[in-house]
Amino acid sequence: AQKVTQAQTEISVVEKEDVTLDCVYETRDTTYYLFWYKQPPSGELVFLIRRNSFDEQNEISGRYSWNFQKSTSSFNFTITASQVVDSAVYFCALKGGGATNKLIFGTGTLLAVQP
Amino acid sequence: DGGITQSPKYLFRKEGQNVTLSCEQNLNHDAMYWYRQDPGQGLRLIYYSQIVNDFQKGDIAEGYSVSREKKESFPLTVTSAQKNPTAFYLCASSKGTGGLSNTGELFFGEGSRLTVL
């Protein structure tokens, strides 16, 4: 079975703090893909990053960085110097190597960045 | 601009009524999906379609129906058989239909919030 766990339901930080959102996944597939999406108050999910199971290199994009560790089945997301505009619900998702693009989503983490 | 359009944004329904949520995309994507979002439960897949005139049940298809008569359109009907229909519904599309050679991410609409009175 495939599963994504985001244990942090809500996180509140003050602007300029660094924050890490945790994601742990379960899959028996040897090839799989992991995603992070952002859901602002408008409701639309916005794609942030995709990582495949063969690429464990960490990725940095501006203030965002992702740490993928197969040994611990984790794909954590860090926001450096958080800003109020980062306030949103963040979802981690998993896609197996099957014949569809179906994604299995975690329950999401609500990030509130206070000014 | 290319994207996914969902309508209506807000919808109220009386118990026992069927309602249809619209989803249109102009991205020329092959696959389309419907997800349901409830507080604390993340997104759960209702139905998906990889090609016109074909669709598959997701994890929570009971009480819902869909059609895919056109590539651009994937409407979702919430029937009276759905016992707890109040939720936020998200439609998505992807360029390909999956497989090891296709890792296309999902593109989402802005969602439709359904409330049963």
Image (cartoon, rainbow, N blue to C red):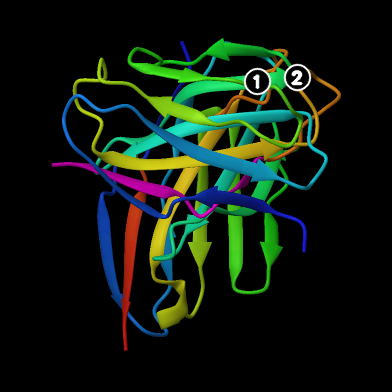
Badge number at residue B49: 1
Q: Residue at x 18, y 36 (%)?
A: B14
**Residue A31 visible (yes or no):** no
The residues tagged by marks 1 and 2 sit, at their Cα atoms, a distance apart of: 7 Å
Question: Quick check: do tags 1 and 2 share a chain?
Answer: yes
- Residue flagged by tag 2: what amino acid is it? Val
Q: Nearer the viewer, residue B17 or A29?
A: B17
Residue A34: percent from left, percent from top: 61, 36
Instruction: State left or right for residue A78 relative to residue B38.
Output: right
Residue B16: percent from left, percent from top: 19, 24
Q: Chain of mark 1?
A: B
- The kind of secondary structure element at disc 1 is strand
Instruction: State left or right for residue B2 relative to residue A33.
Output: right
Residue numbers of the magenta segment: B106-117
- The kind of secondary structure element at disc 2 is loop
Cβ atoms under marks 1 and 2 closer than 8 Å: yes
Q: Going by the picture, which residue comes out furthest to the bottom?
A: A115
Residue A101: percent from left, percent from top: 67, 26
Instruction: State left or right for residue A99 relative to residue B8.
Output: right
Q: Magenta stretch containing residue B113, yes or no?
A: yes
